[in-house]
Amino acid sequence: MSFSKKNWLFLFLIVALINSVFNAITPLSYAQNKGELVIFHVPSNIVSSDLWGAIVSISIFQNTSATITVHPTYGTNYYSDVLLITNLDAITHYIAFNITDPLAMNVFSSAELYLRNPANGELVAKIDIGSTGFRPSNNIANWISLGSNSSLMVDLVISIKASSNTQKFFFENLTLYLVYM
Amino acid sequence: MKKYIAIFLISFLIFLPQLHASRFTLDTISASLVGQAPPVTLNQPAYTYTCLYLSRTSRAALTYQDFEGTSLPSNWASIGSTWSMIPGGGYKGGALQGTDNGGGIGGSTEFYWNTQVSFTSGSSYNITAKVKISAVPSNSIVYAGIAIIRNPTNMLYEISISSNNRFNIRLFSPSPTTLVFAQVTITLNTWYIIYVSITRTTTNIINAYLYDVNGNLLANISATNNNFNPNSGFFGVDVDTRGSATNNGVARFDDFLAGNGDLRFIRINNLQSGMQAQIIDNLGNLVASGSATTSNLALNVLSDVVVGTGTDGRIILKYPSGQNCLIYNNPTSNAILGGDTYTLITATMTIAIDSTKTLANNTFYISPSNANITQTIAIVISIVDSRTYYALLNLTSSSSLASGLYANITLSGSSNSTSIVITNSVVSTSITSEVSISGSNNYILISAYYTTAAKTSTLNLMLQYCTVANGNGACVLYPINLIIKS
């Protein structure tokens, strides 16, 4: 079977198309951390007092990995200023979140991150962390702008179903990735 | 086929640098949520009823007069003497003053309510007044007290204190005769309370009591007399001077009340067991208070039978715990009087608190008019944790308010917060101030009324409590729904 230039071109275009679609839809599958352009901080105004005298634990590893432990109860639990996201770069980056291990909706009636402007407290975006997927969306055009040397404050807001079916002493994990370009 | 695969892989490798161009970068966030029992729980109040309104169901008084203002009261008449009003000269407010000129019955002088009362057989009346002797001419005796005057006005019974330290029942027919007296110290310019009952059978039975202004009994005398048999008569006051001078004795009068029931008490019926009641006059003074051991309560108001200065005043009903249940505001056009009977209307709350004690609904009734203000504990907030939390209430925009609703909602913890304020169904303040809460004596307090009946409002409140003051630390929100009806 002979292989013409036309066939070469056709195959080339097919691979290019697959690549572009692949990048657009599932960029994280291939992304890498190449540096510390957008980093995490523990907010300077953090108040770590939690229910029952527990502590809101926040630890940051190499400025790119944050681990948070909270102790909520039934009702809507609001943890303000649990994380600060800062763009150290000289250019604007666009950020999104990929939720890979969401909070279980059999326990939570809603679960969100509130992103606020730390300068004035203005709400910038709400990020649903109750299901897997990209937030605000897969479409990069909808990603959140984070200007050079700017920051976003993160609040954790979760509502736990007040139901006898909800065990009060549950343990739930949440994992998500901050994605930026 | 191998060629195609090879071509595909070559193409893929061509584009691989683009895939590795690191346009997307990852930072990782992980969170652990460790569920806790609620440190703050919602509970129903100890008393699951509300007080809707108090209505006066009977009045023993036929007439009352507190002698306020500068003009002599209308529908009163005098026989002899000079009668005048003394603003500020009374027990509370003004007083009536009489100066004897000897021009009345048997040389005394009278001022009376100019409405005939029937004295048929079996009729019974009570009359009370405060009296004090203000001036006594030298070498004379001044009598001052209550006059029960026959119609026509030429005879009377006088129940009086006298400056010769007596408490008397005298008959004027028309010359005076002392039927009975008790020796008692009478101090000039000191108020005394005379309370007299007269019952007409085949004769006139008079029982008279003398009290100090605190209601302590000083003397009790009785007389039976048939010297005059009126078909009708008048009630009033009198001053009489005897001795070297027969004129110019001066006396003052206040809190005149006449009726055909016991005028010493105000009765409140249909109370819940253990409820407390207070009668407050228009000047803010506590006149009487008590606790109900049955469904009825009698409050002794002898010290001020025409409560305050004879206008408005309040009756406050409280739960057995002492928390207010109702404020009854008497209209300014009327007085709270000894001998009044009031009946309380209550309604049962319907409270639903879920098993986690973090959701609450309370449906209850309140007053249908501005004459009564319903006050209640809607929800009790208990802190199961030993710590202090910082809480406030927020009225959410999802609330629906029926017309004519006036309400104040307050969070009571270590102190009372400022209130959520609803005025004629318009929310002027939707959030309370923050108060610290600990222990189990924290409450959502409601003070409310509608201007009309058959209204329903739904108030969707959010209780917020935080681990640190000023909304800092971990904060939790509980929904609390109040359905308020009239």
Image (spheres, coloured by chain):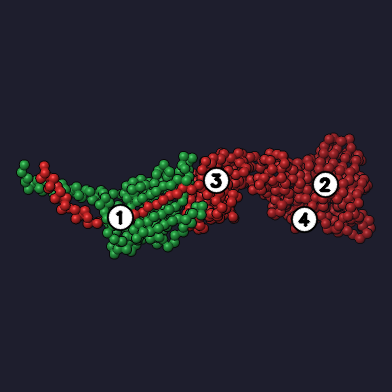
**Which residue is under mark 4?**
B90
- Number of marks: 4
- In contact (CB < 8 Å): disc 4 and disc 2: no
Q: Earlier in the sequence, mark 4 or mark 2?
A: 4
Looking at the picture, do discs 3 and 4 lie on one chain?
yes
Dot 2 falls on a residue whose secondary structure is: strand
Of residues B192 and B436, the one nearer the viewer is: B436
What residue did someone put label 1 on? Answer: B26
Distance from Cα at disc 3 to Cα at disc 4: 52 Å
Secondary structure at badge 3 equals: strand
Mark seen at residue B195: 2
Give the residue number, with chain letter if any, for mark 3: B42
| Image chain in red | B
Determine whether B146 is above or below A46 in the image: above
What residue is shown at x 80% (from left), y 53% (from top)? B213
Subunit bearing disc 3: B
Q: Nearer the viewer, mark 4 or mark 2?
A: 2
* Mark 3: few/some/many CA within 10 Å (<14, 14-19, 20+): many
